[in-house]
Image (cartoon, rainbow, N blue to C red):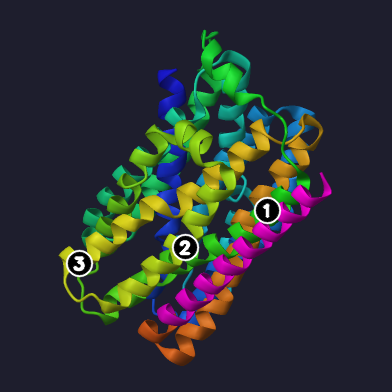
Amino acid sequence: MILNFLFEALNYSALAAKNMISQFFDYRGFSPVEIGYLTVLLPIISMISNPFWFKIGSKISEKRAFLITAISSAFAFWALYFSNNFIFAMIAIGSFSFFFSSFVPLGDSIMMSTVKKYGGSFDKIRLFGTVGFSSVALLLGMLVEYGFIWFFIITSAALLVSSLIIVFKKDKKIIDRKKRKIEFKRDGKVSIFILMLVGMVFGVSMVSFHNTYFPILSREMGFDKSIVGIVFSFMSITELPFLYFAENIIKKLGNFKVLIIGMFTSALRIFLLTFVSTIIPLLIIESLHGLTYILMYYSIFNYIHFRLPEKYLTKAQSTFWTVSLGVTYIISSIGGGYIMEYFNSIPAFRIMAVLGFSVTGIVLLVYIYYNKKINLNK
């Protein structure tokens, strides 16, 4: 069990370094539009690589597929460090993305399979992913003062150590009958899953827009460059309360309501950010992150594994990761890049927030209408 916690922490620590890479691009002098194109390559490629690696995993085992993606990512990432122009950077991040885009999805899938086979609770394992992300984001925020090379050293180390863990770890049966009764209630509907995916596309787009362009916003607002790592670390910590009580919250509110809360809060955060000028109000607003991505991610991931009929599991899981790591980042990186370029940071953040509020309302109305229609047909 301890190795499962460490494995998840390392996976998300690598993700922390990747999520902060837009700061590296900004430091190298790329424009907001160029940063948008560079960061969008990973989600575009993930739309191909995720189905590919999950299919490979079904043939050679997910663990072996994970090892290929992890080790290849560790070495491919360094090409980006040595890129000295936009074209070279595009090629470098493209090759890295083919492997890394499936690294976390395969890792989470392995952990969920372990929970379902041997017992335990995925929310507690995922909590350590947040701890890993937070710790490394804070560490990088301090080390960036000594050079961006630390992004690459720490990411490569996390990728390689997690590969060693997956090779040597052995799982044991955990008696957890109470959770078993809660988990396998497969009464979900594909139509609700699709609507949740649509909501997640726009909700997570708000989060990824924030993560991609917050380094630029913070620079233009006069904050020190170390603030990016500090904020990303703090954001991760705010996920811990939800993860600790995730299963109880999902049981009490339901998957869809949790998703809606995440969508609304995502838009609210990027709107409020445009009014801050000092670090304390900034951190207060960033504390809302604990009610954004993690709620949307967990509500749908839980719905796939414990609500949808088993026959939809593989396809739904592949679609979930393709959408969450693909479509959402395409919208936020390319669309957000042009909005940032033409309207500047503060107006761009407000425009994205208004779009987020609008889509949240539309998705909620569709859900209410759908439920009324179902009840009338009973």
The answer to whether 70 is drawn above or below residue 15 in the figure is above
The Cα–Cα distance between marks 2 and 1, rounded to whole angstroms, is 22 Å
The Cα–Cα distance between marks 2 and 3, rounded to whole angstroms, is 20 Å
Magenta residue span: 349-378
The answer to whether 140 is drawn above or below residue 39 in the figure is above
Name the N-terminal-most of marks 2 and 1: 2
The answer to whether residue 146 is visible is yes
Is label 2 in contact with label 3 (beta carbons under 8 Å)? no
The answer to whether 104 is drawn above or below residue 59 in the figure is below
The residue at which mark 3 appears reads as 281
Crowdedness near tag 3: few (<14), some (14–19) or many (≥20) residues, C-alpha within 10 Å: some
Of 179 and 72, nearer the camera is: 179
Labelled disc at residue 322:
1
Where residue 359 sits, quadrant-wise, is: bottom right
Which quadrant of the figure contains the C terminus? top right
Where residue 109 sits, quadrant-wise, is: top right
The answer to whether residue 46 is visible is no
Residue 171 in the image: state x and y as whole percent.
54, 13
The residue shown at (39%, 60%) is: 20
Q: Amino acid at mark 1?
A: Thr
Q: Amino acid at mark 3?
A: Pro
The residue at which mark 2 appears reads as 264
Q: Give the structural element (helix, strand or loop) at label 3.
A: helix
Residue 2 in the image: state x and y as whole percent.
40, 19
Name the N-terminal-most of marks 1 and 3: 3
The residue shown at (37%, 55%) is: 289
